[in-house]
């Protein structure tokens, strides 16, 4: 498993690169959830409403994942 730490989150990607998770450093899984990937593309998440925070998307993108469909249109 790959674990990435950002300023506010820990992001995990399982070795199969098909699913992962994120958790807030201070609020834990109260502000966390699951991540799903398909062929290097982030296709779904759960746990929080709205959009995934940009720092999670940035961390995943730095690991080679395509996150464009998860970003708000105005970002």
Image (cartoon, rainbow, N blue to C red):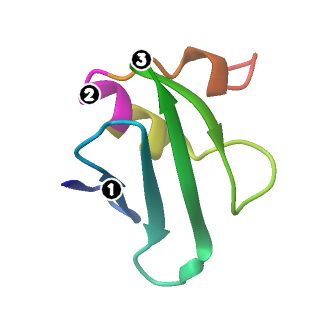
Secondary element under disc 3, as helix, strand or loop, is loop
Residue extending farthest right: 49
Residue 12: mark: 1
Picture quadrant of residue 25 = bottom left
Q: Residues within 10 Å of mark 1 (few under 14, many from 20)?
A: many
Left or right position of 11 against 28:
left
Picture quadrant of residue 31 = bottom right
- Which residue does the numbered mark 3 point to in the structure image? 39
Image spot of residue 69 (x, y percent)? 64, 18
Residue at the spot 65% in from the left edge and 37% down from the top edge: 44
Depth check: 9 or 33 in front?
Answer: 33
Left or right position of 33 against 10:
right
Q: Quadrant of the N terminus?
A: bottom left
Secondary element under disc 2, as helix, strand or loop, is helix
Q: Quadrant of the C terminus?
A: top right
Residue 62: mark: 2
Residue at the spot 57% in from the left edge and 47% down from the top edge: 53
First along the sequence among labels 1 and 2: 1
Secondary element under disc 1, as helix, strand or loop, is strand
Left or right position of 34 against 5:
right
Left or right position of 55 against 69:
left
Residue range of the region highlighted in magenta in the rendering? 60-64
Report the mark closest to the observer, 3 or 1: 3
Image spot of residue 41 (x, y percent)? 48, 20
């Amino acid at each position: 498993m790959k674990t990435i730490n950002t300023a506010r989150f820990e992001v995990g990607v399982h070795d199969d690169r098909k699913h992962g998770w994120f958790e807030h450093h201070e609020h834990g899984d109260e502000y966390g959830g699951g991540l799903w990937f398909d062929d290097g593309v982030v296709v779904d998440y759960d746990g929080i409403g709205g959009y995934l925070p940009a720092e999670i998307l940035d961390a995943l993108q730095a690991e080679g994942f395509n996150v464009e469909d998860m970003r708000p249109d105005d970002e």
